[in-house]
Image (cartoon, grey):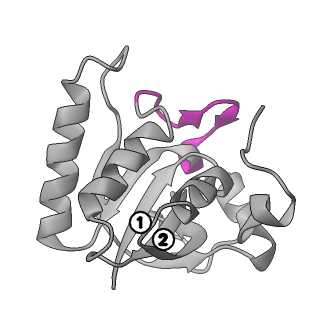
Amino acid sequence: MEQAIFGAGCFWGVQAAFDRMPGVIETTVGYSGGTLANPTYRDVCAGRTGHAEVVRVVFDPARVSYETLLAAFWRMHDPTTRNRQGPDVGTQYRSAIFFHGPEQRAAAEASRLVEDTSGRRLGPIVTEITAAGPFHAAEDYHQKYLEKHGQSHCHS
């Protein structure tokens, strides 16, 4: 098994989208990319931790490739808006890929270049690509939130 970490706005919808993909074994919502150890949702929402809302995806590379996960990541959010997705505004909602190792970094950078030059976007891609650091799982009530509440997406 391998893992990937993606930030694409509100982590509830991102988790639900990855959960529907064949080959994805497990997803966990949480926080990454910041400086505060053991952040809480309240800490991250205050916007002073540097953390993004992210989803850690554990996947079977024999069933789904990292490149396929990247393609899904680009489709599930707007990577041209800095620190914003829909009505959610703040650095915690930034578009981010946290890579594990040089192969993921190269794939993420190549994927961003393809997406940025595809002509599908109205503006340039602002997604950050950075090495994965500590991942902090979000509180239990955030895990599988949409599934628990019978919803399929975050915003109407």
Q: Give the range drawn in magenta.
A: 80-92
Mark 1 → mark 2, Cα distance in angstroms: 4 Å
How packed mark 1 is, by other alpha carbons closer than 10 Å (few <14, some 14-19, many 20 or more), is many
Residue drawn at point x = 72 percent, y = 64 percent: 41
Describe the element under mark 2 as helix, strand or loop: strand
- Residues 34 and 107: in front is 107
- Residues 38 and 30: in front is 30
Q: Label 2 is placed on what type of residue?
A: Arg
How packed mark 2 is, by other alpha carbons closer than 10 Å (few <14, some 14-19, many 20 or more), is many
**Which residue is the site of mark 1?**
5
Tell whether label 2 touches label 1 (CB within 8 Å). yes
- Residues 147 and 47: in front is 147
Q: Label 1 is placed on what type of residue?
A: Ile
Left or right, 113 with respect to 82, comes to: left
- Residues 58 and 49: in front is 58
**Which residue is the site of mark 2?**
56
Residue drawn at point x = 26 percent, y = 77 percent: 62
Q: Position of residue 22 (x, y in %)?
A: 45, 66
Q: Residue 29 carries which label?
A: none
Q: Residue furthest right?
A: 149
Answer above or below: position of 142 versus 120: below
Q: Quadrant of residue 1?
A: bottom left
Q: Position of residue 40 (x, y in %)?
A: 71, 71
- In magenta segment, residue 86: yes
Residue 51 appears in view? no
Describe the element under mark 1 as helix, strand or loop: strand
- In magenta segment, residue 116: no
Q: Where is residue 124 in the image (x, y as percent from the top left)?
A: 30, 23
Mark 1 and mark 2 lie on one chain; the one further toward the N terminus is 1
Answer above or below: position of 126 versus 99: above
